[in-house]
Image (tube, helix red, strand yellow):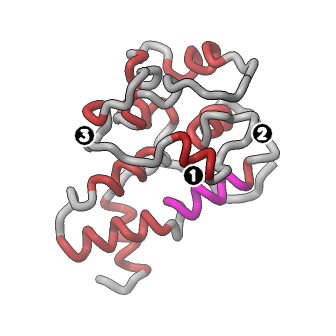
Amino acid sequence: MSKLVFEPLLSPRQIIEYGAFGGCYFGFPIEEYTNYDYDNLFNQLFDGLDIKLYLGENYSPKLNQFKLRSGMDYEYWKEMNWMHEDDPYGWFEWYCKYTLGRRHEDDDRQITRWQNFCGKNGRWKDRIYSNIYKTKDWKVSPRIQQSLLHWGYFVNDYDFEHWKYLNKKL
């Protein structure tokens, strides 16, 4: 069991409800064989949600919170070796299963990725608050904000105030 700090602001369901992955995270075909019961995962996490929000066959930016394309494609993920064989769809699949209670040999790696992206000292969390501070515009950098949403994080006043304090911007 990982001892790393992992505290996303959004659950997998909330990420999908807000609008992420162009509606097709679990809809694109994968080459890897898996006998995992995805219907059970969908029933537990997404019951009552329109399946076009997570099982679409094509990426649709209009389904994203910020109405734009964000993130790299599946082939890039594979080239970067970001997926474990037990989670062939990648990070979000891992997070769904983690939320449902699975603990796995890949937890530390995935949690470290999350920390580096949007955790306490995450580079993209830091970047968005720096951009907001410079521009005084909470709608700045929608692509970064969409990417943060994919990782279970959303921009908020509390964290912005904390960022200003840590960066001596008060």
Q: Secondary structure at mark 1?
A: loop
In front here: 167 or 127?
127
Q: Which mark is residue 7?
A: 1
Q: Which residue range is magenta in the image?
A: 109-117
Task: Specify which label sits upstream in the sequence, 3 or 1.
Answer: 1
Task: Specify which label sits upstream in the sequence, 1 or 2.
Answer: 1
Q: Residue at x 35, y 34 (%)?
A: 19
Q: Which mark is residue 67?
A: 3
Q: Residue at x 43, y 64 (%)?
A: 124
Q: Residue at x 43, y 80 (%)?
A: 166
Residue, disc 2: 103
Q: Nearer the viewer, mark 1 or mark 2?
A: 2
In front here: 12 or 51?
51
- Going by the numbered disc 3, the residue's amino acid type is Lys
Q: Nearer the viewer, mark 3 or mark 1?
A: 3
Coordinates of residue 15 in the picture (x, y in percent): 43, 37
- Going by the numbered disc 2, the residue's amino acid type is Arg
In front here: 10 or 42?
42
Answer whether labels 1 and 2 touch (C-beta < 8 Å). no
Alpha-carbon span between mark 1 and mark 2 = 15 Å
Whether residue 58 appears in magenta in the rendering, the answer is no
Q: Nearer the viewer, mark 2 or mark 3?
A: 3
Q: Could you tell whether 160 is left or right of 72 in the image? A: left
Coordinates of residue 14 in the picture (x, y in percent): 43, 34
Alpha-carbon span between mark 2 and mark 3 = 34 Å
Task: Specify which label sits upstream in the sequence, 2 or 3.
Answer: 3
Q: Secondary structure at mark 3?
A: loop
